[in-house]
Image (cartoon, helix red, strand yellow):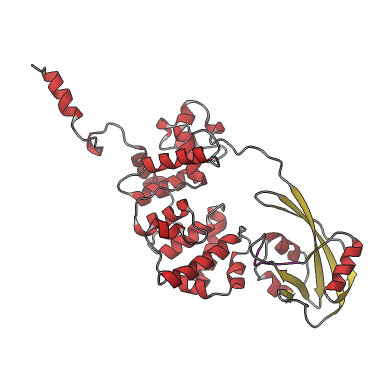
Amino acid sequence: MRSRLGDWVNRVGSIPFTRSNRLMPTFAEDLIAWQRVHGRHDLPWQGTRDAYRIWVSEIMLQQTQVATVIPYYARFMARFPDVAKLASAPEDEVLAHWSGLGYYSRARNLQAAARLLCERHDGVFPRDIDAVTALPGIGRSTAAAIIVFAYGERHAILDGNVKRVLARCFGIRGHAGEAAVAAALWQQAEALLPHSDIEAYTQGLMDLGASVCVRRAPRCGDCPVRQRCTALRTETVHELPTPRPRRAVPHRTTTMLVLEHEGRVLLEKRPAPGIWGGLWCFPEIACGEDAVQASAARFGVDAIAQDVMPAVEHGFTHFRLTITPQRLRVTRAADAAGEPGRHWWPLADARAAGLPAPVRRILAQLSD
């Protein structure tokens, strides 16, 4: 005959493990409660179910800080308020509104995807994650974020901030660029998904990684999941996530020819794909005084060397670039620039064009 204690244990063991009978909230519940009080609620792309506005913000936020994105987002949405406007706009104008944000393939992919949305989906952003990831420039995590915030669908995100949160909280070692580590992070992200409040949960993950579980000087005392954090318990917060293996960063140099004539400058449109594809730049030339004069002649101009301009340093993801601007005053110029994609720009117009940041810095040194 069973004891009363045994019967009680068996009955308890058969009760579903629900929120009402748990003694400790889940990771998701802690995060949702924290987000409602301490999270971000007034960003310009919040408070909407418009998938287009959410999509543009998610693309802009890739590898770019929120504070940097906000003014660009406002200008971009004012000019391209919907998918159709973005799809039909000239590429030069799209890139001009992106100029300064960097990673310009994002803008080109954004417009390419807008055109596909108009062609294949009647301008309506799909709810199916496979259909979203089939669009240019949208990976698994970005697609999930868009669908979560636009449609309330249940999907896991795994951007850089979330990787850091999960690696620390659950002690996941190894660089996230390794396939096995990435798979472990995705598995953990999927396992933590709540069955409700998915928008608050997803925003909470983003907010936690952006404001508390930051790369340097994390504020562990303010973390809503600190009691379950492996890195905090084992004093390995600053070891996780495992950094990318260090490699020497290549250094490249180039010379740009700054030709000035009657308040105008000569710019060339860079081919796409490639670095700064679709943007306007000063012509790149070989180094050396003879090369400068030969290049000036190639552009159909007679020119006199001006004062030396300071070199401009610029960092890319995989290399550093030093640009030496060679400034020349043109005394005679041909009527045309000579080739398609080459144009004499008035200085004021040039500054409003789609330019990479270093070219914009060089232009800023020139007087009207």
The quarter in which the C terminus is drawn is: bottom right
Q: Is residue 152 magenta?
A: no
Taking 180 as reference, is 296 left or right?
A: right
> Above or below — where is 211 with respect to 344?
above
Question: Which corner quadrant of the image does residue 47 belong to?
Answer: bottom left
x and y percent of residue 310 in the render?
Answer: 81, 57
Task: In the rendered view, tell whether residue 293 sits above or below residue 203.
Answer: below
Would you say the magenta stretch is mainly helix, strand or loop?
loop
Q: Is residue 191 visible?
A: yes
Q: Position of residue 37 (x, y in %)?
A: 38, 46
224 left or right of 5 in image: right
Residue depicted at 14% across the width and 19% down the height: 5
Tell me where residue 120 appears, x and y as whole percent.
Answer: 43, 70
- Front residue of 41/49: it is 49
Residue 279 sits inside the magenta stretch: yes
Left or right: residue 258 compared with residue 89: right
The single residue placed furthest to the bottom in the displayed view is 335
Labels in figure, total: 0
Pinpoint residue 329: horizontal percent, then vertical percent: 86, 72
Placement of the N terminus among the 4 image quadrants:
top left
Q: Which residue occupies 74% across, 71% down?
A: 267
Q: Which residues are magenta?
A: 277-282
Q: Is residue 138 above or below residue 13?
A: below
- Residue 257: name its quadrant: bottom right
- Residue at horizontal 77 percent and vertical 64 percent from the top: 365
Residue extending furthest toward the left: 1
Quadrant position of residue 107: bottom right
Can residue 44 be seen by looking at this rendering? no
